[in-house]
Amino acid sequence: MDRRSAMRMAGAAAALGAFPVSPALAQAFSPIAGPRSRVIYVNDLSGDLDGFFATVHMLLSRSVDLRGIVGTGTGRPGETAEKSADFAREILGLMALTGRVPVHTGAAGKMAAAKSAVASPGTKAIIDEAMRTDTDLPLFVAVGGGLTEVASALLIEPKIADRLTLVWIGGDAFPSGGTGETNFNIDPLAAQYLYNDTALRIWQIPRAAYATTVVSATELQAFVAPHGAIGKWLYDKVVDAPNRFRKVLNMGETWTLGDNPLVSLIALGDWGPSSYRPFRYERTGSNLHDEVIAPRLNPDGTFAPRSEGRKIRIYKSIDSRLMLNDFFAKMRVNFPDRA
């Protein structure tokens, strides 16, 4: 065995120690040094379909130590935290990962009043992971939905405010913000609390950025559907979408994988220079952001600029080439073509 092969095997073994996988996934690339961050992944999987794709992408990314999945609700009929948690377990089963990553149920509903925490197993999972003292890996809480669980976690245990970074798909672009964005509207009070009343580190991917992550149905048919039971399941969700979405909105041949930037920003690097914390390895990259004094977030989702306070990141663009090609490649490597 040559030195390169030995190093590859050693890296795979190190990563597998933190992220146990089935034999079917054991040959995929793993960083030699192992994971470089911890992630609690929070998503309303019972809502839009993009959360399914981001969940699979995150599970296949070996540079993160995925510590838990929190299924959340949207407030719309049938789109509950319990159903989202069930979808997470179904995905794990289809990937032969049952029991490998804990699944937690999020809040039963949004905050009833300002600074009114909603306790849930998902909120407790965020607190427990943030309070760990046995690791120095930075913790990201990656959210592809509303912010009820994160806001509730900080209200219940304020000490965690400087122990994690929130990466959030939601809201609108700086400096004006906007109205009507889906994930902000799930729980406006939670979002306002995190922006206006905490010192939490925030990386926001607003609608103007995540809406550019467009994929065609034919790409999914060619690059996702042939790869394992999970690939077929993902593609079938898109094929079946007319029963849920296209009766009211004809999407044509495209879909937006708007939650996958969570993986792109955390797992694929792009940790640019920042005052957040001294990451061991930083580089600028092709996901462009502004680092601004956190604006005040208004009840309608618009921003009011502030002249002092902590800085947050607000992303302007996402490298869709890297994000989509990495997802397609991971599907192909982990789940070889069934044909």
Image: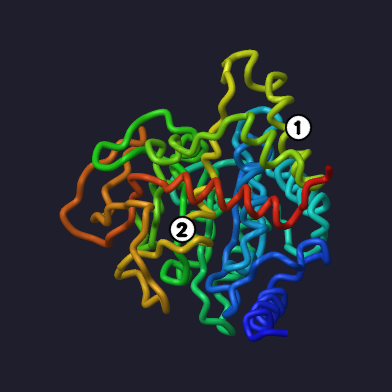
Q: Hey, which quadrant is residue 103 in on the image?
A: bottom right
Q: Is residue 166 above or below residue 221?
A: below
* Res. 108 mark: none
Number of labelled discs?
A: 2
For the residue marked with disc 1, what is the amino acid? Asp
Instruction: Give the vertical position of 122 relative to 19 (above or below).
Output: above
Give the image's coloring scheme: rainbow
Q: Residue 224: where, in percent of width, then height?
A: 69, 41
Give the amino acid at mark 2.
Answer: Leu
Residue for point 67% across, 28% down: 77
- Of pointers 1 and 2, the one earlier in the residue sequence: 2
Residue 236: mark: 1
Q: Which residue is mark 2?
A: 166
Label 2: which secondary element: strand
Give percent across and percent down for residue 25.
76, 62
Dot 1 falls on a residue whose secondary structure is: helix
**Camera-nearest residue between 113 and 5:** 5
**Is residue 101 rendered to the left or right of residue 257?**
right
User: Depth check: 78 or 47 in front?
Assistant: 47
Place of residue 152 in the rendered image (x, y in percent of width and height, measured from the top left):
53, 55
Q: Residues within 10 Å of mark 1 (few under 14, many from 20)?
A: some
- Between the C-alphas of marks 1 and 2, the distance is 31 Å
